[in-house]
Image: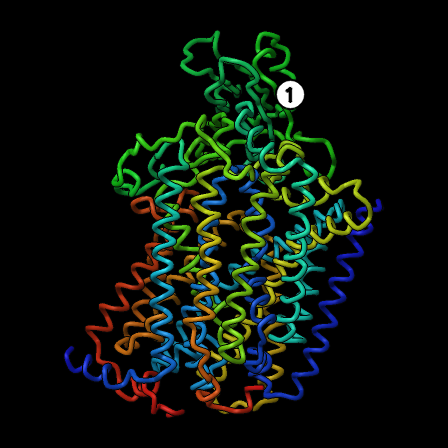
Amino acid sequence: MTQTSGITMAVFVIYILGVFVLAGLSHQLLSRKSFLGEYFLGSRGLGTWALALTFAATSASGGSFGGYPSLIYSHGWILAFWIAGYMIMPLVTMGLLGKRLNQVARKTDAITIPDVLRDRFESTTVGLIASCLIIFFSICFLVAQFKLGALIIEDTFNLKWSRSYEISLLVFAVTVIVYTAYGGFRAVVWTDVMQGIVMGIGVVVLVPIVLSKTGGLENTTRELANQAPLAITSVPGPEGKKGTFNDLAVRAIAEPIPAELVYLKPVNSEAVLKIAWANAVGDGQVVQVTMATDADGTVTTTANDIKQAIEQHPEFGQILEVEIPYKNDKDGQGATGVIGFPKEASEYRYTFLHGEEFLFGPGRTNKGSPFHSLGLIISFFFMWTIIGMAQPVTLVRLMAFKDSRTLNRAMMTVTIYYALIYLPLVFVVMAARSELPLLTPEDSDRAIVLVATRVVAGMGIWHQALGAIFVAAPFAAVMSTVDSLLLLISSGAVRDIYQRSINPHVGQRTMKWASYAMTVIVGVVVTVLATHPPDFLQKIIVFVAGGTAAVFLWPMVLGLYWPGMTRQGAIASMLGGFSVVVGLFGPTWVGHGRINLMGFHPAFWGVVASLVLAIVVSKISGPPPSHLTRKYFSRASGVDQ
Amino acid sequence: MADVSRDITEVNDDPIFRHTRREAWFIMILWTACLIYNCTYCYLYGYLSHPPHPDSTGPSIGEMVGPLTSFDRDPATLTTPLGLGIPDWVFYGVVMPWLFCIVATFWFCLFIFVEDDLSSADASPENSE
């Protein structure tokens, strides 16, 4: 084991031990307080730092230190625009609903989000729909996050065993299930605080180190403007199987600059790679490499073969440079997987990205389409703020703080925290770009880890420890999301479905063991599902984020602020929003793209449909019972139940 | 509908509800201002071209706004304000409004947000510390 991996292992072990210690301390509190309120809501006792950091850490998820830096690496400065909604996210997500939701939850002693909706509209149906949809969405999301957690362990420790994924998954699952089930909400919050500190310190310390080591942003921005046009291919292996990518990077080092690079599907047992020049027609302006196939017609040519074939043409060597990008493969043999073509595709087409495309919008995907068009600009600003506000894991936290002053201080804290994390991450990755190896879109998920380990390499043991902390940050982010979701499902099943809908007279002791058991059962079920996760996990994550917003945003917002909202309006809003999102995402489950009406993201339309239905159906079915409007909107409501 | 309005007017006198509603209006106005400024500025001054969404179903919002070719950015005009290495459009379109939002959030928390007593709404004392 190298010194660096030894330090990484030490940081991981200390971190996991810390998590278990916090779970133990939290469990002691469970015996002294009302079980359900403490287990699922921490007895509404969160202070400023706990609320701020659990809010920030939970909403961060693994993507903040995996997918987001990867996108910065792949598309450049446009990501500062892409993430810009975070400038006002803390104020919107915490300030718009926080105090009012906390007040309403206290009125009826609600512990969960379905509790709040059920009591606000005095409807078991509303509560059950909310519970079932939370469980559905959360399980989908958990499968993706469990897989991500296992991959981080496998990747960090470079495990090469035949069952390394399953073993990593087991380690991740046991850790997170045990401390969540044993410690409940307070353990989750305390570990979130620890995770939030780890993530925050990681970024804050990394920024000056990277900027000083790389000579600052000015140099790298100018270098990027002059960067040679580059095409990075990433063709899935046979039958779209992941892990056998055949990656190749072609860089134009002189005029004329190539226009595109095309893989053509095998025809008559012969597949072809063509690199075509701008405005070119004819053989003289096209590099064409014939790729070998076996008896079944499967391509057997590797990226290395193609690289060698192109380099055998000296006339092209003067204007093209072919590279094999960094590959985080376990056998260390580089891009050796053979090219495969999904049945419906006849070709793979890649365009050359110019240096200035990393400095300005709209950015481009490696298949040539614009990365951040106008519809998506508005959709993302909308998603980060308005949709972020409606996530059940964040809403639950707004029910758990102890007083208004706590919320007030936490909003300021999270605002500073996000400003220190999300924009500086753009600075860090952009500044370090020239120090990183050439990465494919898939391997660019490791961009921030490579920044932390390579840029600080050779700077002494403390800097290596910093690198190790950064390696742990995505793991911490995934854990902080997973533990919250486990409790969300458990509370949905035990509190909302069993206690409030099936057996209202169940005893405290039964509820206690049912809560422990349900948390463990959910964890085990998700672990089993994650052993064979579907390939479209990223699509699931986007679908879940949009779907939960379309279901919960307006019933919650209008329920809290509009006395005229009725239970029929709430039901129509939830089911309508859900149907629209499912319908627009539908094509993705059969291998096609989602439906972007007018260029807007499906989540946007789901939220719009949910709003329209909530208002129209409430107007038609109203007015709501007067005792409900008095209870929730009148000074003299007291605890009128 | 008139009855509903009268009923609502009569009952919505909960002080916490009124405070939170006023605070919500402030937040929504600020959010709208940020959305309009950030999206408009960056889209107009930070884009090499303004293509519509490639997979749009029906007319794309990008097409409806127009081609905006007169706003296509010339890469040669790139500047980096204050020598920070941040492209001008990011500096003025994202960094500056982000700083403004930090100030606005603190302003909101210190001068607009009312620290109401939430414990008065408690239904069950055993669940609060």
Quadrant including the C terminus of chain A: bottom left
Residue A82 falls left or right of residue B5: right
Question: Which chain hosts label 1?
Answer: A
Residue in view at x 26 percent, y 65 percent: A613
> Residue A524 appears at what percent x and percent y?
63, 66
> Residue A576 appears at what percent x and percent y?
31, 63
Residue in view at x 67 percent, y 83 percent: A29
Display coloring: rainbow
What is the quadrant of residue B114 in the picture? Answer: bottom left
Is residue A641 visible in the rendered image? The answer is no
- Name which residue type carries label 1: Asp
- B49 in relation to A631, above or below: above
Residue in view at x 14 percent, y 79 percent: B2
Residue A156 falls left or right of residue A640: right
Query: Circle 1 sits on which residue?
Result: A305
- A452 in relation to A233, above or below: below
Q: Secondary structure at mark 1?
A: helix
Residue A111 falls left or right of residue A453: left
> Residue A563 appears at what percent x and percent y?
28, 78
- B37 in relation to A234, above or below: below
Q: Nearer the viewer, residue A232 or A94?
A: A94
Among all residues in the image, which is located at the extreme left?
B2
